[in-house]
Amino acid sequence: MAVQTVASTTDPTVDLGPAAALSCRECGHRVPLGPVFACEECFGPLEIAYDFSAYDTEELRKRIEAGPANIWRYAPLLPVPSDVADKPNLNPGWTALVKADNLARELGVTGGLYVKDDSGNPTHSFKDRVVAQALEAARAFGFTTLSCSSTGNLAGAVGAAAARAGFRSCVFIPHDLEQGKVVMAAVYGGELVGIEGNYDDVNRFCSELIGDPAGEGWGFVNVNLRPYYAEGSKTLAYEICEQLGWRLPDQIVVPIASGSQLTKIDKGLQELIKLGLVEDKPYKIFGAQAEGCSPVSVAYKEGHDVVRPQKPNTIAKSLAIGNPADGPYVLDIARRTGGAVEDVTDEQVVDAIKLLARTEGIFAETAGGVTVGVTRKLIENGVLDPSLTTVVLNTGDGLKTLDAVAGTGLTATIRPNLESFREAGLV
Ligand SMILES: *Cc1c(COP(=O)(O)O)cnc(C)c1O
Ligand SMILES: [Zn+2]
C-alpha cells in the first residue's frame, strides 16, 4: 500500500469527533489531524487539541452516564467519531474500582484505598484503552495494517483489536518476553516478530521502518498514531472520578513505562475540572517504577529535569523502557501536583503481588506489584498521606507473568484418603 492512498492531513472526511487539531506540547504549533507525531518546528511531541466549547456540563454528565459500560461513554471527550460504539472493536474499559479495605488495613490507610483493576480489560491489560483510540485513527487515515513496538501487553492488545476490526497486524517485541505475553500476542493470528534486543532497540527499529517503503501504509499505534493512542489513558482518570461519584481522588499511584499513561491521566483530570464535571481541588500523582528500570525515579530523586537512559534489568518487563519518551513530563507533573516518583526492588514487587492477592483477591502482573509496592514504600517513608483517598492502579493480569510468583504452589500432596490428609498437618 502506497502512502499516497492514506487520507491526507487536510481531508475533510476525517471525522474524529471533538478532536480539532494536533498541537505541539512544547511550542503550541498546530497542524491538522493526521498520522504525524512530532512537531515540524521543534520536534516536540504532538497531542490532540479539542473543541469542547459546545458542551453544557450537566447535559454532558447525563450523556456520559447514559452511555455504554465501556470507554465509549466518554466518546465526546475522545478523538473518535460519534458512532464509534457501533464499530467493531473490543469495547474496553469501565473496569472495577475495588474498595480495598483489607489492603488499607495492612498498609494503615484510613482515608479510603481503591484499586483500579485494569486486568479486567479484554486482553487483560490497560493497553486495550489506548489501542482502541489508535484503531479509530487508523480507520480514519485509511491504514490497513496495525503495528507497534511493545513490551508485551501492547502486542496482544493490537493483535486482538486488529482481529476484531478486520485489520492485518504485524507487531514487534523483544525476543525474550514472558511466555504468557508471547502467546497472548500470537494467538490472535497476526504476525509477531521477536527482535534481538531490548524494548528501546525495538522502538528504534520501528521508527526506521516508518520511514522506509516497507512500512508504508502501516499504522504504528504507539509511534505515528501516538497522539491518538495516548488519549486512551485519559479514560482511566474519567472512570476513577465517575466511580468515586464525580469526585477527584486525593492521591493516585500510576506505573511508568514511557510515562504516557501518567501524563494523560493528569490531562484527563484537568479536563474534568475545566468541564465542571468534578469540583476543583488539589490532587497528587505518584509515579512507580521498578528499581531495575528506574530512569524517571532516579531523575526525580536527583532533582533533574532530564532523564538519563538506563539499560533495563527487572522482572517488571511491561514497564522496562530505559529511555521513556514522556519522562520529563512525568517529572513536571509529580512536582507540580506535590506527588513523587519512587521505585521498588524485584523482591518487593513479588511481595506486593502476593499482598494484593492475599488481601483483595486480585492477581496483578508485575506492574501491579510495582504500584502496590511503591504505595507501601511511600506510606512508610511518610510521602503518601494515609488519611487521604488513594487510588492505586493495577494495569495487568498476573496470569501473564506467572514466573514472577514461581514457587507458589501446592501446600501438600496427599493420597486420596482422610488419614493422609490428617498426616499433612492441615487440621
Ligand atoms: C504499557 C503499560 C503501562 C504504562 O505504559 P506507559 O508507556 O507509561 O503509558 C503500565 N502497565 C502495564 C501493564 C503496561 O503494559
Ligand atoms: Zn513544536
Image (tube, helix red, strand yellow):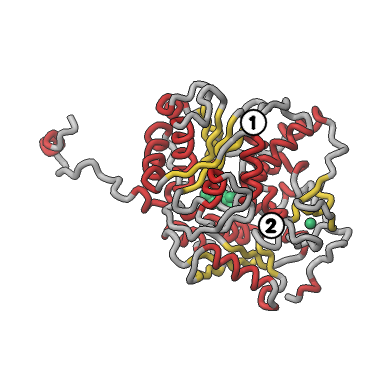
Mark 1 lies on residue: 283
Q: Position of residue 61 (x, y in %)?
A: 76, 30
Between disc 1 and disc 2, the foreground one is 1
For label 1, the SS is loop
Q: Is mark 2 within 8 Å of ligand 1?
A: no
Q: The residue under label 1 is which amino acid type?
A: Tyr
Q: Position of residue 356 (x, y in %)?
A: 42, 36
Q: Foreground: 11 or 342? A: 342
Q: The residue under label 2 is which amino acid type?
A: Arg
Q: Residues within 10 Å of mark 1 (few under 14, many from 20)?
A: some
For label 2, the SS is helix
- Residue at 53%, 68% (x, y): give it: 192
Image check: 160 left or right of 197? right
Q: Foreground: 150 or 380? A: 380
Q: Position of residue 193 (x, y in %)?
A: 52, 70
- Residue at 41%, 41% (x, y): give it: 353
- Which residue appears farthest toward the bottom when viewing the image? 213
Q: Is mark 1 within 8 Å of ligand 1?
A: no
Which image quarter is the C terminus in? top left
User: Between marks 1 and 2, how big is the CA–CA gap?
Assistant: 26 Å
Residue 361: name its quadrant. Answer: top left
The disc label shown at residue 304, or none: none
Is residue 12 in view from this perspective? yes
Is residue 90 in view from this perspective? no
Mark 2 lies on residue: 226
Q: Foreground: 215 or 411? A: 215
Asked if marks 1 and 2 touch (Cβ < 8 Å), the reply is no
